[in-house]
Amino acid sequence: MSLRGGTGELSDALASRLTGDLRLNTRVERLERAPDGSYTLTTTAGDAVRAQAVILAVPAFIAEALVCDMVPEAARTLAGIRYVSTGTVSLAYRMADIRRPLAGFGLVVPTSERRPINAITWSSLKFSHRAPEGWALLRVFFGGSRSPQSLELDDGALLATVREQLREFMGIETPPLFHRIYRWRRSNAQYDVGHLDRVAAVEAELPPGLYLTGSPYRGVGLPDCIKQSKDTAEKVLVQLARVKG
């Protein structure tokens, strides 16, 4: 399943329902803890925001930069969470131009083949509203730890590489009606052996009122991130109740 307009609909809907001092597209430059246990967040605009609790739902390397002065040991552990960069190319074709049947939802390329792509998804079969009748939308995955060299190709070379792979896999000779290239640098946290122990060690080092949540820690999928956010929100509510009490 997916949202008809893409997963951006989810964050947009959440943002529209939030209340209070909401600051979108605002970067936090510094995070400090006062002797009374409160926090001050300084933004790149020079604004200072005071808070009793702070949730860092950010990549581990961003969290590391924000907490390094408060808890250097936790920061060092956060810095050790490895990231890889990934990318996709989406391409539109007429169904008549695809010579091999689209069975299932796509394919994963074995690592042993050492190809410049990692997988292909038939997006318009997986999600029926993604293309009109008689057309197909394909999405090719590259980068990560398996084909990092593909991320360094310029757009023209990358498109030529992807088209060659589609020709070999699917018999597609014609140019796509359109294509879109996306690259996400340092986007995917890697759960190396001992990851959960490291996360627990970081959490044990954090001072009261400071929390981590999101894909770098206890699950990368949307359901995992939602569960983490709920668990974290409950912890914050308990903490704030204690402060008021």
Image (cartoon, rainbow, N blue to C red):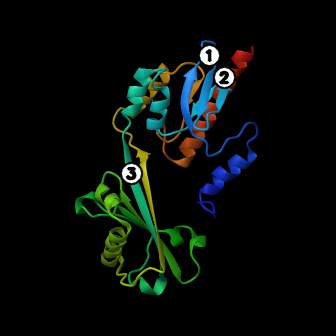
> Where, by quadrant of the figure, is residue 139 drawn?
bottom left
Tell me where residue 199 appears, x and y as whole percent.
Answer: 44, 29
Q: Between disc 3 and disc 2, whose residue precedes?
A: 2
Q: Quadrant of the N terminus?
A: bottom right
Residue depicted at x 48% and y 84%: 94
Q: Secondary structure at mark 3?
A: strand
Q: Amino acid at mark 3?
A: Ser
Left or right of 129 in this view: 93: left
Q: In x, y percent, where is residue 124?
A: 53, 72
Give the percent coordinates (x, y) of residue 76: 38, 27
Amino acid type at circle 2 is: Gln
Q: Outermost residue toward the bottom?
A: 96
Q: In what quadrant of the picture does the C terminus appear? A: top right
Q: Please, is residue 173 above or below residue 235 in the view?
A: below
> Marks 3/1: CA distance?
37 Å
Q: Are marks 3 and 1 in contact (CB under 8 Å)?
A: no
- Of labels 3 and 1, earlier in sequence is 1
Residue beneath the point at 27% across and 58% down: 111
Q: Is residue 242 above or below residue 235?
A: above
Q: Which residue is mark 3?
A: 85
* Residue behind mark 2: 52
Classify mark 1: residues with Cα within 10 Å, few (<14), some (14-19) or many (20+): some
Q: Please, what is the three-letter code of the amino acid marked with disc 1? A: Gly
Q: Residue 217: in sight, yes or no? A: no
Q: Are marks 2 and 1 in contact (CB under 8 Å)?
A: yes
Return the residue at label 1.
37
